[in-house]
Image: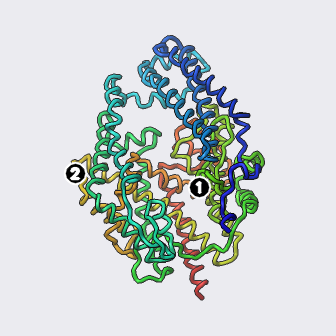
Amino acid sequence: MEESKKLPKREEVPVALTWDLNVIFESDEAFHAAYQELEQKIAGIAAFKGRLTESAETFLHCIQYILEISNELETLYVYAHLKNDQDTANAVYQGMYDRASSLATKAGEAISWFEPEVLEIPEEKLSGYLKENKDLVMYQHYIDQLTASRKHILSANEEALLAGAGEIFGASSRTFNVLNNADLQFPVIKDENGDDIQLSHGVYGQLMESMNRSVREAAFKNLYQVYQGLNNTFASTLSSHVKYHNYNAKVHHYQSAREKALAANHIPETVYDTLLEVVDDNLPLLHRYVALRKELLNVDELHMYDMYTPITGEAGIKFTYEDAKETTMEALKPLGEEYLAVLEKAFQERWIDVVENAGKRSGAYSSGAYETNPYILLNWHDSLNHLYTLVHELGHSAHSYFTRANQPYVYGDYSIFLAEIASTTNENILTEYLLETQKDPQVRAYILNHYLDGFKGTIFRQTQFAEFEHFIHEETAKGTPLTSDFLNQAYGKLNARYYGPAVEEDSEIAFEWSRIPHFYYNYYVYQYATGFSAATALAAKILKDEEGTSLENYLTYLKSGSSDYPIEVMKKAGVDMTEKNYIQEAMTVFETRLNELETLIETLKA
């Protein structure tokens, strides 16, 4: 029995279930040859330094040279990281990955002068370049992005001083990471079988899904007892980091840290405010779902440690990888023949590394470079959840494929703001397909609950984080000290408002802010909620396609890359993220599926 549980070695995995990296480099020797050639090219960047004002032709050649290096570097890096991830115990590929990472650092240092020098070129001269040399026109948006923050750039000396202090400014974030990931000592508790288990971040997430309530409660209380013991320390690290965000924004002439953070992708601040407003208006839907959870768990009091355990039992349905491929092709038919042809390429041309093997990196992702296939790493197990994972990652890879096939390298990628929309649109379409084809009430309940839990975790919970993040930045700007007591009270009150009267106000949840790394990311987390909302609205549009243009608009979004600002790309897809409609449309889908689950539960009771 023990032998059967062992993971296969990498060389034992059937070739058909592995990704084909030979189309990037025929051999490791070819990689090393390309590496040496690129090293020499990187050294050549210095020849352009100080010469950007010479002529339009010199400016163009410099842009092309830097982009060529970036393109080749990405190819090298992707090959090395994929080789490393397929077997992290392989010392050869560990070394290859380290070399690629070092080369990326070297390239970054060699190119670091370019943007400041571009910003020193007067606007009139840049405009003249664009008129003088027609080959520069395709780089217009790229140049606009570089120069958009011109009025917020300080003198070269001032920027150098701030850059030099970067490690100091980042000290609070690094201290948090060391504390949170290395130094915290969590206690040993009992698992479902009564065995001792060492509590950790990963184990905590698993235990929160346990069907044994006493295990969930013990994990919850023991975890937060540790954070309570360092409450003042975490308040200090968070406060210092928020002050850094505010200071950095102020010296660069922004009105707030949020304005500076969102300006990087030209996202209007109204997008953020609208998200908070619409989610707040729809909190009664979350309260209803939480109340249903209380009813189905059959508890007198619902606690925060009851929020992740399954409420509809097992799915009673599994998918082999071959089954999943078939289901994926059927489910995603609404995305049209052009889209399905890309999925066929993914399966036939071995973009996907399917099964788990010894040493393989855990989890799942989509990765690739402009010149490579958009590869997918899986660790397949026959389950409904892994079907969703496959469909999700194919969404990312199809997005990457369409972008690279339709855009030049300079626009051959897309922002984080757009990244999760394509993958989650696929998930929504799969959910609709499963609800149309699965008739077993228990399976349908599981699918509905899967969707509602995902919505809860991505839209409601991430918006809660976004609201708290903005609150602490604003309070700091007013001069309010972010003491542990202040943060605990504010977070506890916010959590109670979000989850509603069906949930007990557990004192431990007030410390949750202290373990959330996203609060150090500088207005990043809201994008999970806006992306999921947009995806829900897009899937609904594609499936209804009342105007007959929804699919065409969606494909336009997939093909746009970074050729325009994210908000404008989404308008082409048919979703104006400066308005509230798309979030409200997502809420309507949530309510419809909540209604169905409530009705289904009543049927199962009868």
Residue at the (52%, 66%) spot, across then down: 453
Q: Residue furthest top?
A: 54
Residue at the (64%, 42%) spot, across then down: 83
Instruction: Identify residue for label 1.
Output: 424
Residue 248 in which image quadrant: top left
Residue 332 in which image quadrant: bottom right
Residue at the (65%, 48%) spot, across then down: 376
Instruction: Identify residue for label 2.
Output: 480
**Dot 2 amino acid type:** Thr
Q: Is residue 101 left or right of residue 519?
A: right
Q: Is residue 32 left or right of residue 49?
A: right
In the image, residue 304 lies at what x, y percent? 40, 70
In the image, residue 180 lies at what x, y percent? 38, 53
Do tag 1 and tag 2 residues touch (Cβ < 8 Å)?
no
Is residue 290 or residue 591 the one in the foreground?
290
Callout 1: 10 Å neighbours few (<14), some, many (20+)? many
| Vertical comparison of 427 with 194: above or below | above
Quadrant of the rendering where the N terminus is positioned = bottom right
Tag of residue 52: none
Callout 2: 10 Å neighbours few (<14), some, many (20+)? few
Marks 1 and 2, how far apart at CA: 39 Å
Is residue 374 or residue 588 the one in the foreground?
374
Quadrant of the rendering where the C terminus is positioned = bottom right
**Dot 1 amino acid type:** Thr
Q: Secondary structure at mark 2?
A: loop
Q: Is residue 481 left or right of residue 159?
A: left
| Vertical comparison of 392 with 431: above or below | above
Q: Secondary structure at mark 1?
A: helix
